[in-house]
Image (cartoon, rainbow, N blue to C red):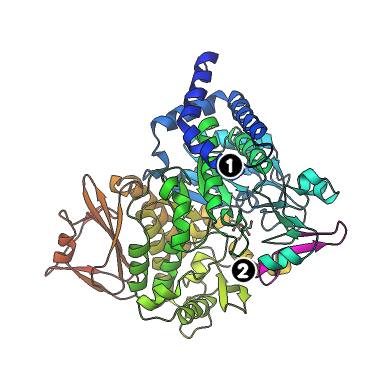
Amino acid sequence: MARATRQTTDEIFDLRLNRSAPDLWPMLDTLYGQHPEYDSFRQALLKALRTSWDARPADLKHLDLKRDLEPDWFQRPDMAGYVFYIDRFAGTLKGILEKLDYLEDLGVTYVHLMPCLKPRPGDSDGGYSVMDYRAINPAYGTMEDFEEVATALRARGISLCIDLVLNHTAKEHAWAKKARKGDATYQDYYLMFDDPTVPQQYEQTLVEVFPDNAPGNFTHYPDFGKWVWTTFNEHQWDLNWANPQVFLEIVEIMLYLANRGVDVVRLDAVAFMWKRMGTRCQSEPEVHMILQALRACSRIAAPAVIHLEEAIVAPAEMLPYLGRGIHDGREGNLAYHNSLMVQFWSALATRDTALMTHVLATHFPERLNNATYATYIRCHDDIGWAVTDEDAAALHLSGPAHRAYLSDLYEGGFPGSFASGALFQVNEATGDKRISGSFASLAGLEKANGAEAVEMAVQRILLGHTLIAGFGGMPLIYMGDELAMLNDRSYLDQPDHAHDSRWIHRPKMDWSVAATRDQGDSPAARVFRGTRHILARRKAVPALHGALPVRVVSLGVPGLFAVRREAHTGVLLGLYNFTERWLDLPEATARAQGITQMHDALSDAPVAADGGVIALPPYARVWLT
Ligand code: GLC
C-alpha cells in the first residue's frame, strides 16, 4: 500500500463511493431532502468523506483492502470478544500493553474498551456522557496512547471496538455549552422547548429509562429558559438527528476515530435517535435510515470498520438493527442478542427450555445477510426481563408473574434461589424490576455452600460460555466472568456510583487470581481454563461460522436446548442441558437431525450412546457432529 500511487488510492475511493452511493443518498434524501441547506450539506459530507480518506494511514488502508476481500472476517469462528473498562482491567491505556499475553492466552480476537472518550467530570453514566469525542479520557491516557494500543492489538490480530454515543452528549460538550449560551445554531443540535407544553405531549407515550434516579424525559433549565430532551440522565442531552448538521458532525467524528485504528464502532442507544409524537420514540423507521447512511459512510471512507448497534429491545424491534427489508445487508454488522441472554437466565431458573426454544425458534431468522449476533451472557448493564406477555402465554405462563419470578430468583430472595444479585430501577408503574449482578454470583457461586453447589455454579458458567460460543454469532466475554469474579459491593461507598447498582458487576480485575489460572482447581481456575478451551475449540470448528444458518430445534426433552448449525461438512447439533439432572437423548433423535459421526466437537471426543441413549450429565454441553 505504501507504494500505491496517489492515483490508485483516488480510484479506490471513487469505486467505493460508487459502490455505496445507492445505500447513502436515498436515505439522506428522505431524511433531509426538505432542509433548506440540503445541497450544501451534501457537498460538505462528500468533502468530509474524501478528506478523511486522504488522511487515513497506509496500514489502515491496507486493512481496508484486506477486509474488502474477506468481508466475512467478523463472522468467522476465530472471532471471540472481551469487554472491559480500561481502568478496572489495566489501570490505563498503556497498562493494556502489558496485558496482551493474557488476552491472547484466553483466545480473544476482539476487545471492546468500555467508554474511553473524554467524559464529563463526576458521574458520567460509566462514561456514556461524553464531553469530547476527539479526546481520550485523561484518566486513561492520551490519543497517542490510544493509537499505540490500537496498533499493538492489530499486530496480535485483535480488533478494537469503542463506544460512540449517538443519542446524546454530555451537557458539558462544547455544542451544549454554546446552546446554553443562546447560540441558535447549537440549540438546533439538541431538542429544546420554550415551554413544557410539547414535552408534556411527548411524555404521554414515552417510557422512562431510569425511573429511579432520572424520572421523566425532559429537564427544565431556568438559567436559559428551556426544556431539554434528556431521555437518560439529566446530564445527557439528546441530539437532534433531524438536523443534517448533527449527521455531518458525527460522521466526521466516526471517521476521525476510525483513522486512529478503531475496527468496530459500538453505536450506543441507537433506538432513541428519532422522535415522533404519539410514539415511544424508539426504533422509528428514520433510525434505520440514519444507521444505514452511517454504515455507507464507513464503507466509503474506512471500509475496514464495522458497526455494532446497541438496541436492547424485543426481538421484532431488534432484528431491523441487523438490516431487514430495504436495509438488508446494509445496516448493523453486529447487534446484541438480548433475547438469547434473557432466555439463558430464564431457562436456568426454571430448568425448562420450552420458552427459550419457542422464542428463539419463532422470532429469529435462520440467516442474516452481512451481519451476525453479538452473543453474551453478561455485560456492564442490568438484565431487563424482556419476555413478552404473548410469548409467555404461548407456554401457558403469565408474563408479569414470570418476570417477577425471575427478578425475585436472581435478586436471591426466592426460596431455594441459587443466585445473589441486586435490583436495578424498580418501576412501580410497570412492575419491572431489572437485575444487576456478576455472572458467577447470579449463577450461584457467591451463595454456594459446599462442594456440590460450587460445582453446579461452575457448570452453569461454562454452559453459558459454551452457548454464546456455539449458538451463532460472535461471543463477548465480559471481564471477570472468565475468572468467576463475584459481585463487588464497594460501589455503595462511592458517591458517584452508589445510586447505580450496575456497578456491582463492574469489579476491578483480580490479577492475583488471574496469575494462578493454570494451577489448582479453584472455581476461578476451572472457569478460566474451561472458557479458554471453549474459545479454542470454537476456532477449530468451521460449522460455527456466523453466516451459516442457525436452527433452534425442539428435541422433546424438557430441560434440553438444541441448536442446529448446518455446514457444508455436515450438521453440528449444539446440546445444552439446563438442569442439574442427567437427561437422556435418544440416539435416533440425534441421527434424525443429520448427526452421523457421533463426535463431540467441543471435547473433541466420541460420544457414547449406550442402549441407544446419549446420557447428558448436569449442565452438559455437547457440539455433536
Ligand atoms: C447504553 C449503555 C448504558 C448507558 C446508556 C446511555 O444503553 O449500555 O450503559 O447507560 O446507553 O448512554
- Does residue 491 appear in the picture of this structure? no
How far is disc 1 from disc 2 in space, using C-alphas? 50 Å
The residue beneath circle 2 is 205
Q: Quadrant of residue 594?
A: bottom left
- Left or right: 602 with respect to 285? left
What secondary structure is the magenta-colored segment mainly?
Answer: loop
Label 2 sits on a secondary structure element that is loop
Q: In the rendered view of the protein, which quadrant contains the C terminus?
A: bottom left
**418 with respect to 215 (left or right):** left
Residue appearing at x 49%, y 19% in the figure: 11
The residue under the point 56% across, 43% down is: 30
Q: Which residue ends up furthest to the left in the rendered image?
A: 611
Q: Is residue 226 magenta?
A: yes
> Residue 318: x and y, percent?
47, 58
Q: Nearer the viewer, residue 499 or 397?
A: 397
Which span of residues is magenta-colored?
Answer: 203-227
Image height of 286 relative to 394, above or below: above
Mark 1, secondary structure of its residue: loop
Q: Nearer the viewer, residue 313 or 599?
A: 313
Instruction: Classify 378 as above or below 115.
Output: below
> Which circle marks residue 98 in the picture?
1
